[in-house]
Image (cartoon, grey):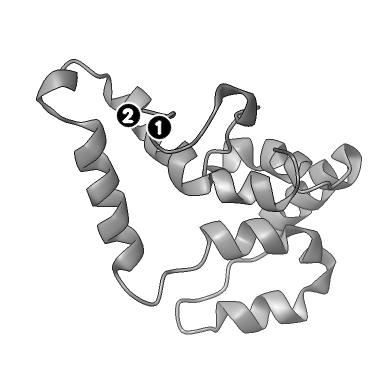
Amino acid sequence: MLMEWGITNEKIHCFIRDSGSNMIRAMRFAAIPDVNCTSLLNEYQREKRISISNDPLLWWKVNKKFQSFNLIVRQYLSSPPNSVASEQLFSGAGLIYNPLRNRLDGDKAANLLFIKYNLFLLESLHFI
């Protein structure tokens, strides 16, 4: 499946999940030093959460101390302005789940989809 998408094994050094537990690993790919990354992430997690009525873009503009997170924040904490991305994801899932792959584990399929739709992040950082 990866070859069909033009993704070679050499291109996949690892992939980044969109959960907080792997945020530090994601920031390593964004060229943020480990010590700084860990302390900034801890500081960010201690921040008071904004209310639903507040503008998150304004919050990120005001809190420049977390500017190192911009690449990751834009990708994972923003909502898409339309449904094209979700439609593409469902279309990609349809390519993965087919009658010939009826025994494919859900986690593996999710990882394949994640790699397919997030590989551009690593390519943009020149890691691949």
Which image quadrant: the N terminus? top left
Q: Nearer the viewer, residue 21 or 91?
A: 91
Q: Secondary structure at mark 1?
A: helix
Circle 2: residue type = Ala
Percent of width and height locating residue 121: 62, 50
Q: Secondary structure at mark 2?
A: helix
Residue drawn at (81%, 73%) of the image: 64
Q: Nearer the viewer, residue 51 or 30?
A: 30
Percent of width and height locating residue 27: 73, 45
Percent of width and height locating residue 88: 30, 56
For this orientation, the residue located farthest to the left is: 99
Q: Real-space Cα distance between discs 1 and 2?
A: 5 Å
Judge from the rendering whether residue 60 lies leftward or rightward of residue 34; answer left or right. Answer: left
Q: How many marks on residues?
A: 2
Q: Nearer the viewer, residue 39 or 85?
A: 85
Circle 1: residue type = Leu
Residue drawn at (65%, 84%) of the image: 58
| Residue highlighted by disc 1 | 112
Judge from the rendering whether residue 124 lies leftward or rightward of residue 100; answer left or right. Answer: right
Please give the label number shown on residue 56.
none
For this orientation, the residue located farthest to the top is: 103
Judge from the rendering whether residue 92 lies leftward or rightward of residue 25; answer left or right. Answer: left
Judge from the rendering whether residue 13 lies leftward or rightward of residue 75; answer left or right. Answer: right
| 82 over 115 or under it: above or below | below
Residue drawn at (69%, 53%) of the image: 124
Residue drawn at (84%, 67%) of the image: 65
Instruction: Categorize mark 1 by other alpha carbons within 10 Å: few (<14), some (14-19), many (20+).
Output: some
Please give the label number shown on residue 109.
2
Which image quadrant: the C terminus? top right
Contact flag, marks 1 and 2 (Cβ < 8 Å) = yes
| 105 over 34 or under it: above or below | above
